[in-house]
Image: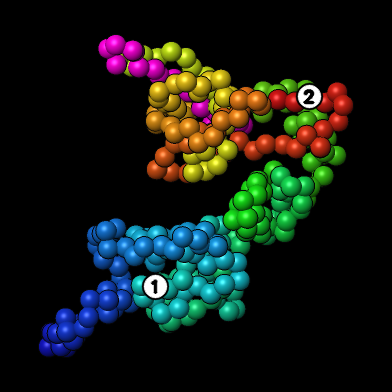
Amino acid sequence: MFRSLLVVCAAVASLPADAQLSSRFVVGCPSQCDKSMCPRLPADCSAGKGLDVCHCCPVCASGEGEACGGSGKLGDPVCGDGLECSVPGGVAYSVTVRRRSKSGSCVCKSTEPVCGSDGVSYRSICELKQVSRRAQKLQQPPVLFIQRGACGKAQDNPDSPRHKYNFIADVVEKIAPSVVHIELFRKMTYSKREVAVASGSGFVVSEDGQIVTNAHVVANKHRVKVELKSGASYDAKIKDVDEKSDIALIKIDAPNKLPVLLLGRSSDLRPGEFVV
């Protein structure tokens, strides 16, 4: 047995670096993740990004219906956010399946229909995200998740927050994680010392840290600091300002995805209806 192991080790040592790395993934991933060795991603990943089979390097993920799994080696396609790999027969993609070199296709974890901010009902949250990515690629507004179930159903539901007496408090509690505190600093003319000159609020509109606030809040300020509900603080960059409509877009670089405030559509409102 020991002699066989020596033969295997000698054979692996004689292979090129890429081949050695791939062969290790047959039995397991390296104990340490060295992100400096990760390959560069292409500019556009149509189905979003994910982590490789070792949960180390970012890779372009497979979309719904696309291939996943396979040889159990580095480079096997992985499914995007909200998707899971399923092999023929409905068997879940596991270590045992991977060792048998079974390949499958990406399917959505949820089959529940959802309503998007464009007023369209989608068969799953995965389809909505796919349409949203396509819209952003065309420089169009993203499609946001509004509610579970087809569009229009919640309006007729007597148990929905809209029909409850205290629905405003429910809304405030729901959106609180996506509301941020903004503090503005300006440098003194002679001392160059920074002093806090104003504060305001805003709300997160994308998981990667884009925040909407008022234009007058960030106007003529040298530094903008954002504090999340969790207490974490980040310096923000001013991305765009529309003084006419008093709207500004700023961005922070947070290590994790942020909770997003979903906006409604004015066309769905009725005269006299409450708006928060």
Q: What element does badge 2 sit on?
A: loop
Density class for disc 2 (Cα within 10 Å; few <14, some 14-19, many ≥20) is few
Magenta range: 173-192
Q: Quadrant of residue 73?
A: bottom left
Please give the residue where the numbered disc 2 appears in the rendered image.
274
Image quarter (top left, top right, bottom left or bottom right) of the C terminus: top right
In this rendered view, identify the residue nearer to me: 218 or 179: 218
Vertical comparison of 178 with 184: above or below? below
Instruction: State the CA–CA distance, disc 1 to disc 2.
Output: 52 Å
**x and y, in percent, of residue 7 in the image:** 15, 88
Vertical comparison of 217 with 89: above or below? above
Q: Can the viewer see residue 133 in this picture?
A: no
Image quarter (top left, top right, bottom left or bottom right) of the N terminus: bottom left
Q: Can the viewer see residue 218 in this picture?
A: yes
Please give the residue where the numbered disc 1 appears in the rendered image.
75
Residue 144 part of the magenta-drawn span: no
Amino acid of disc 2: Phe
Residue occupying the point 50% across, 36% down = 239
**x and y, in percent, of residue 157 in the image:** 82, 39
In the displayed orientation, state which residue is furthest to the front: 190
Residue occupying the point 75% across, 26% down = 275
